[in-house]
Image (spheres, grey):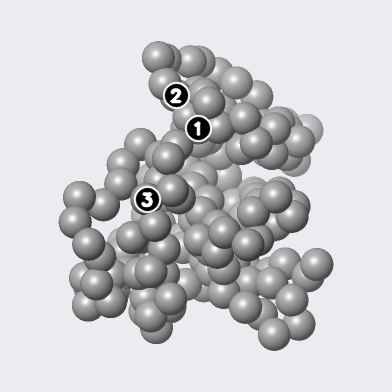
Amino acid sequence: MKVTIRPLQAEDAAISYKWRNNLKLWKYTGSKPDRNITYEIELSWLRDALKRPNEKRFAICVGDEDKYIGNVQLTNINERTAQLHIFIGEVGYHGKGIGTKSTLLILEYGFSVLNLESIYLFVHKNNISAIKLYKKCRFVQLKETDEMIKMQIVNQANQNQ
């Protein structure tokens, strides 16, 4: 299946607000909405998020019709590092390799376009499928707490210079 990423747009809130209200999607995340998220709440949040200079947010799109099914982003960006987040909101697309392809695309962006030295993430230690995905993409575990694992990948191009 064709997977692409494109810059997230405020108009994407018309779809993404529905994902925010599916509690099953938030099982392994560090935070979840504390109220029902309306389109207006999501639109306001997204407009603010897109203005943040140290964040690059992308829509995950699949198929020839570029159907929007999730988000992948780099946050806490500085000249050397950034934090990766990924979210597949359309449950029917889970387990199809889209997370792996999207992760590889955002890594390429972070290392080639932003010239980052490393990218890190936090994953719930019980989210076995996500951990497998990250290891497949060459992330290594740095440390583990009661619930979360911190993983990182280093830009190999920078290592060879």
Q: Secondary structure at mark 1?
A: strand
Q: Residue at x 35, y 60 (%)?
A: 20
Relative to 5, is 133 above or below? above
| Residue 23 badge | 3
List x then y, in percent, for residue 159: 72, 31
**Cβ–Cβ under 8 Å for marks 3 and 2:** no
Instruction: Give the mark toward the camera: 3 or 2.
Output: 3
List x then y, in percent, for residue 9: 43, 78
Q: Residue at x 37, y 50 (%)?
A: 23
**Cβ–Cβ under 8 Å for marks 1 and 2:** yes
* Quarter containing the N terminus: bottom right
Badge 1 amino acid: Val
Q: In the rendered image, which quarter is residue 38 located in?
A: bottom left
| Residue 123 badge | 1
| Residue 148 badge | 2
Badge 2 amino acid: Met
Q: Is residue 72 visible?
A: no
* Quarter containing the C terminus: top right
